[in-house]
């Protein structure tokens, strides 16, 4: 394997990890505030559709991005309404949103485009272009570093860079600001926050809204940057894998980033392996490759890597109790 | 402590929740540019009125009874089994494996029960692993069961396009099971004794599903095992105190839950289709969640909710047929709304209702 | 004449059909320590929760320093200079002292600047009020007494001139309680008005200037502490004359029914919760285990009842030896004649959503009381429940009512009835009268005595020293997971036990 081969795999890794990173950060913010978010998958799917549909109708990827974030935030608010205001079962609310998204995306897709739920293929102008960072060409001839810059660092679409930025941003938000202190407190001991005179519901709503925004970017990435349009069920479980990465990363931004990159790397590597012969097994069938991310998720969750301690108040609706 | 009278809790509130779900769906239909009243009419015709419609409705109801029971049994232990889809799919594998091994010579009386047992066993096995991982490794059961749906789908595709594929075919599906393994159709049975019934895929699976309901009711509310399960679901620390082997129970409950979901396969593999078709669970595993929630995890409620969804699904097929702009995913949308209102927002109306009819 | 610091007029609050506060009037003079006493369920906590903005009253007025004070939420209360130290601390366990104190008044959107400023404020407050705490300590690592100081400092920093303390001494040793009262007196000198909510008569007599008594949601009396007695207050609390004594039965202790030797137990995090604990329970004898909660008593009860496995050490129940290699679970323990009344009634002893009759067989559901063979018989459970309810006068005698619908005292009676009915040879009893009214307490104490007279070997774990002293034949004291002393009842006194509870060991074991 050459340096270039490795770079191409890593390049693929970053792109495959992007929706995972964004959704996992979304889940992290939500769960650090005490709200379980099984609905990441549904938000991802719905915002992918919204982005593609809007881009197809307006010709602008940016409009698509805005629409994606808006749809995702709306779903987040519904989830918040059920869980925060009405203290409903958070897991069920999440599942409901996922099924709603599955149905609503096709219903809307058929109504708008009559293609069995798909959006029409997006033209280049309606998608996010790859961004060439300064030095993309200038460094090209420098050995080792040139290809590294050109293939791995530069040339990604906007959402990828947003995903990378999201990690330190979330870290800073949660550990260096007043809002973050309160958010983490409300996920551990909401009563403490309440008795300090801060509104628990408003804090939690803001957390889920932030989660919505991040998922929106992820969805837009899937259909208008990575792909060229919306296809039914295109989220393919990435929302759930992001959850697993969040648990594996113990709700800490940098560890979660590592977990997402790991998943991305495995998926990228698996795609490479497909069709080639491995020493003991022979030719690797495509089905194995396709289910590998899901199997890996289960293996990771089987906890061979230490016990994870979630935020203390996670999943428990807040009531003023006596 | 204020309690709602039973009729309010088990009838009024679910009705309100459903009405809200349908109301929102009606708005969506209007937004698409069609008339909700017309859509509803088409659905009702499709579910009940046309020749054979009622049989079809009950055929789908059968599926939902099985998956609903599966989710409900797990719910009683506060476990969220979202893997009904994969467990049903693998149930089909169980049935076809038994048939491949035995259906060339074994008579119906032995073969059918064995095939049924095979479905249940495979479904149970597919739920056993996530159950074990939750009990002994603390792995989040929601995520693992969902992952197992994807893994199950991948496995079945590989098998149906490979080893199990019907010889000479290019479609991924299994060979047909022998006549001896087929569950008799209800319309055949009724016609034989003089009752006129239009043909439909409704088979013996339906009464078997009803039997399963009785079985689940007895298990949960009339056995000591069921007592321990419910105690564990309501208060794990009290169950520990009571000497309930919590981890073992989690695994057993999931296995039973998986077995029930696996049984759904007999409706298609031994019933309507007579073979394993690609993606035959077609989302019914998820519908089971809605059914269990609406039916409050009680067999009577589940039968009623399953019937509603059976009608919805059958009516939805008609909708798809009649309207250009509406497909059967509309039913999926309604399903999501029902889960939302019956599950997460189920308590939304309680304060108002309590004020109206509650008593101490 | 100065206006009262707090004046409540006609405060009424309903929860559904229950009237928690019925037209309460209250006046508290500034710069005094005012006690509010009443039984569990009298409505004291509800009243002060209204004052702190947790609930809004259905009707009534609040005045602070003579001016109307509409308090809708805790932010309002804080603005009016009210601070509250809750019974269950409102502290984030894995935050530091500094972060907890900052919460709500961080001093800016960015934390860095706020932290420095708060640190200075905190050190100043600590000096002024003589309340030392390390700002960088993590809350869950601090002993309970220090955690309470953090709560007080939190309130003071927000400018509280009226401090509400809800059952503050439940988690303190006698020595810590004395220190705590000194702190209160110091605060009073500084002009802070203090509302002390408690159910303990002794505390009222010791530290308050004035006292109000609540009973069943109503305010039934105000007194100057110096002008009243414990008996008068008890009578006001209950509504009739009350004997505060329990009849002790003397019995000769018999055979050792259960013994533990060298039990050492670590939790999931590897922290030792029990170190080398040994004890024995003799037939016809009550062994009282005193100690502030959180010192290993819960873990000990869990091990003795079979819920938690033995790690190091061993147990003997009759002839049966229990070790790490030969574990015995709760079901087997019951078969061996061990009955367990858990400390946590709501989480362990009962399944609250279950009907009373279902709870009546909890732990015994595999046996005949719940039906024949593997089948559950509602009729059998009903009959059994009726028997229990009659014997122990559980009200209402409604076997089909969910356990959550019974009062604390009746719930506890049901649990006791269930365990006593099996005529166990050994009973492990944890906090039997927590949350129980005075009448219920008397009944429960009498029943425990009766079991002892019948030859049962009883372990009584309680944080209420009075209860331990009233019932025990022998007393052991636990601190930090070790037995730090034991003595026969005749040689026991509060001072000696108090020292042990605080960790001063008589056995020479390192505390």
Image (tube, coloured by chain):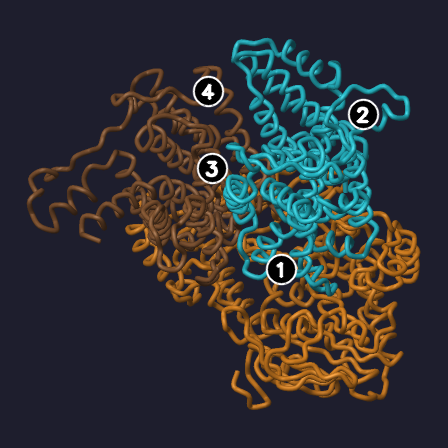
Chain painted cyan:
B
- Label 1 marks a residue whose chain is C
Q: Residue at x 66, y 12 (%)?
A: B42
Closer to the camera, A244 or A72? A244
Chain painted brown:
A
Mark 2 secondary-structure assignment: helix
- Tell me if residue B67 can be seen: no
Q: Marks 3 and 2, how far apart in space?
A: 42 Å
Q: Residue at x 12, y 51 (%)?
A: A144
Residue A125 picture location, percent across and down: 25, 21
How many residues crowd mark 3 within 10 Å: few (<14), some (14–19), many (20+)? many
- Label 3 marks a residue whose chain is A
Q: Are marks 1 and 3 on the same chain?
A: no
Residue A102 picture location, percent across and down: 51, 29
Whether tag 3 and tag 2 are in contact, CB under 8 A, the answer is no
Q: Earlier in the sequence, mark 4 or mark 3?
A: 3
Task: Quickly name the residue at label 2.
Answer: B187
Task: Quickly name the residue at label 1.
Answer: C167
Whether tag 2 and tag 1 are in contact, CB under 8 A, the answer is no
Task: Quickly name the residue at label 3.
Answer: A41
How many residues crowd mark 2 within 10 Å: few (<14), some (14–19), many (20+)? some
Task: Quickly name the residue at label 4.
Answer: A109
Residue C331 picture location, percent across and down: 76, 69
Q: Examine the image and state in which quarter residue C459 appears.
A: bottom right
Whether tag 4 and tag 3 are in contact, CB under 8 A, the answer is no
Q: Would residue B193 be found to the left or right of residue C238 on screen?
A: right
- Label 2 marks a residue whose chain is B
């Amino acid at each position: 394997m050459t340096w270039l081969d490795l770079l191409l795999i890593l390049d693929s890794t970053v792109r495959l990890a992007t929706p995972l990173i964004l959704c996992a950060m979304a889940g992290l913010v939500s769960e650090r505030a005490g709200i379980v978010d099984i609905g990441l998958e549904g938000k991802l799917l719905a915002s992918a559709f919204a982005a593609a549909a809007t881009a197809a109708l307006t010709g602008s990827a940016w409009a698509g991005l805005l629409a994606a974030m808006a749809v995702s935030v709306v779903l987040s608010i519904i989830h918040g309404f059920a869980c925060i205001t009405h203290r409903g079962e958070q897991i069920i609310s999440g599942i409901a949103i996922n099924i709603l998204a599955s149905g609503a995306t096709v219903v809307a897709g058929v109504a708008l485009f009559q293609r069995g739920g798909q959006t029409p293929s997006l033209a280049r102008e309606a998608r996010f272009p790859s961004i060439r960072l300064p030095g993309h060409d200038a460094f090209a001839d420098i050995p080792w570093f040139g290809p590294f810059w050109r293939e791995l660092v530069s040339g990604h679409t906007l959402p990828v860079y947003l995903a990378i930025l999201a990690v330190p941003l979330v870290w800073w938000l949660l550990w260096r600001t007043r809002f973050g202190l309160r958010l983490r407190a409300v996920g551990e001991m909401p009563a403490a926050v309440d008795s300090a005179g801060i509104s628990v519901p408003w804090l939690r709503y803001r957390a889920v809204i932030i989660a919505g925004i991040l998922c929106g970017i992820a969805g837009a990435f899937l259909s208008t940057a990575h792909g060229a349009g919306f296809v039914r069920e295109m989220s393919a479980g990435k929302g759930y894998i992001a959850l697993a990465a969040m648990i594996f990363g113990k709700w800490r931004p940098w560890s979660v980033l590592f977990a997402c990159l790991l998943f991305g790397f495995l998926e990228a590597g698996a795609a490479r392996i497909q069709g080639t012969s491995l020493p003991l097994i022979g030719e690797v069938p495509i089905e194995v490759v396709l289910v590998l991310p899901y199997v890996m998720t289960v293996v990771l969750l089987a906890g061979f890597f230490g016990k994870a301690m979630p935020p203390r108040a996670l999943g428990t609706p807040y009531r003023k109790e006596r | 402590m204020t309690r709602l009278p039973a009729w309010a809790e088990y009838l009024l509130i679910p009705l309100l929740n459903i009405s809200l779900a349908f109301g929102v769906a009606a708005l969506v239909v209007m937004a698409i540019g069609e008339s909700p009243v017309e859509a509803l009419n088409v659905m009702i015709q499709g579910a009940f009125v046309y020749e054979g419609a009622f049989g079809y409705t009950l055929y789908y109801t059968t599926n939902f009874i099985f998956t609903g029971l599966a989710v409900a049994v797990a719910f009683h232990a506060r476990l969220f089994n979202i893997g009904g889809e994969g467990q049903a799919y693998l149930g089909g594998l169980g049935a076809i494996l038994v048939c491949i091994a035995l259906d060339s010579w074994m008579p119906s009386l032995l073969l059918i029960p064995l095939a049924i047992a095979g479905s249940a066993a495979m479904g149970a096995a597919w739920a056993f692993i996530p159950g074990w991982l939750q009990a002994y490794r603390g792995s989040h059961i929601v995520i693992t069961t969902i992952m197992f749906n994807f893994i199950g789908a991948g496995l079945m595709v590989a098998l149906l396009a490979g080893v199990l594929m019907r010889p000479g075919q290019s479609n991924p599906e299994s060979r047909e099971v022998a006549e001896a393994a087929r569950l008799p159709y209800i319309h055949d049975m009724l016609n034989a004794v003089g009752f006129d019934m239009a043909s439909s895929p409704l088979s013996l699976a339906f009464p078997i599903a009803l039997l399963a309901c009785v079985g689940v009711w007895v298990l949960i509310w009339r056995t000591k095992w069921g007592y321990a399960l419910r105690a564990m679901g309501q208060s794990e620390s009290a169950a520990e105190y009571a000497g309930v082997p919590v981890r073992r129970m989690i695994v057993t409950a999931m296995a039973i839950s998986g077995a029930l979901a696996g049984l759904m396969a007999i409706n298609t593999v031994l019933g309507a289709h007579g073979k394993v078709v690609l993606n035959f669970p077609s989302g019914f595993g998820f519908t089971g969640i809605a059914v269990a929630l609406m039916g409050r995890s009680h067999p009577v409620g589940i039968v009623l909710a399953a019937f509603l969804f059976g009608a919805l699904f059958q009516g939805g097929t008609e909708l798809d047929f009649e309207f250009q702009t509406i497909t059967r995913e509309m039913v999926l949308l309604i399903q999501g709304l029902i889960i939302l209102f019956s599950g997460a927002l189920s308590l939304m109306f309680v304060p108002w209702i309590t004020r109206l009819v509650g008593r101490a | 004449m100065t206006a009262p610091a707090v004046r409540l007029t006609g405060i009424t609050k309903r929860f559904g059909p229950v009237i928690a506060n019925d037209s309460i009037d209250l006046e508290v003079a500034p710069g005094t320590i005012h006690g509010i006493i009443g039984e569990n369920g009298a409505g004291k906590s509800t009243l002060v929760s209204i004052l702190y903005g947790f609930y809004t009253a259905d009707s009534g007025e609040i005045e602070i320093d003579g001016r109307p004070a509409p308090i809708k939420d805790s932010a309002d209360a804080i603005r009016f200079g009210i601070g509250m130290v809750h019974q269950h601390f409102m502290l984030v366990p894995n935050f530091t002292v500094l972060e907890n104190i900052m919460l709500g008044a961080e001093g800016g959107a960015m934390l860095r600047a706020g932290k420095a400023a708060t640190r200075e404020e905190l050190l100043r407050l600590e000096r002024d009020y003589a309340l030392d705490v390390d700002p960088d300590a993590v809350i869950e690592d601090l002993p309970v007494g220090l955690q309470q100081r953090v709560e007080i400092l939190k309130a003071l920093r927000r400018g509280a001139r009226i401090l509400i303390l809800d059952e503050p001494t439940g988690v303190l040793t006698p020595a810590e309680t004395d220190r705590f009262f000194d702190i209160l007196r110091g605060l009073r000198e500084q002009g802070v008005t203090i509302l002390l909510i408690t159910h303990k008569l002794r505390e009222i007599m010791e530290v308050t200037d004035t006292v109000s008594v609540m009973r069943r949601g109503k305010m039934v009396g105000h007194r100057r502490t110096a002008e009243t007695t414990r008996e008068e207050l008890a009578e006001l609390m209950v509504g009739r004359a009350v004997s505060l004594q329990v009849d002790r039965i003397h019995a000769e202790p018999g055979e050792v029914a259960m013994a533990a030797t060298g039990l050492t137990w670590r939790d999931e995090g590897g922290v030792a919760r029990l170190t080398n604990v040994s004890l024995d329970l003799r037939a016809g004898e009550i062994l009282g285990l005193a100690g502030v909660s959180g010192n290993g008593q819960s873990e000990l009860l869990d091990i003795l009842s079979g819920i938690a496995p033995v790690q190091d050490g061993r147990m003997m129940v009759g002839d049966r030896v229990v070790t790490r290699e030969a574990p015995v679970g709760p079901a087997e323990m019951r078969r061996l004649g061990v009955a367990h009344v858990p400390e946590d009634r709501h989480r362990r002893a009962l399944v609250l959503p279950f009907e009373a009759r279902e709870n009546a067989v909890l732990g015994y559901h595999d046996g005949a009381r719940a039906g024949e063979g593997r089948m559950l018989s509602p009729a059998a459970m009903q009959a059994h429940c009726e028997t229990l309810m009659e014997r122990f006068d559980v009200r209402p005698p409604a076997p089909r009512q969910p356990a959550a619908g019974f009062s604390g005292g009746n719930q506890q009676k049901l649990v006791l009835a269930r365990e006593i009915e099996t005529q166990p040879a050994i009973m492990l009893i944890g906090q039997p009268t927590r949350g129980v009214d005075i009448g219920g307490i008397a009944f429960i104490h009498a029943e425990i005595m009766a079991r002892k007279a019948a030859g049962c070997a009883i372990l009584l774990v309680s944080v209420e020293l009075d209860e331990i002293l009233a019932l025990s034949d022998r007393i052991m004291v636990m601190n930090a997971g070790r037995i730090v002393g034991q003595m026969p009842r005749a040689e026991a006194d509060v001072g000696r036990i108090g020292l042990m509870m605080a960790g001063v060991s008589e056995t020479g074991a390192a505390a």
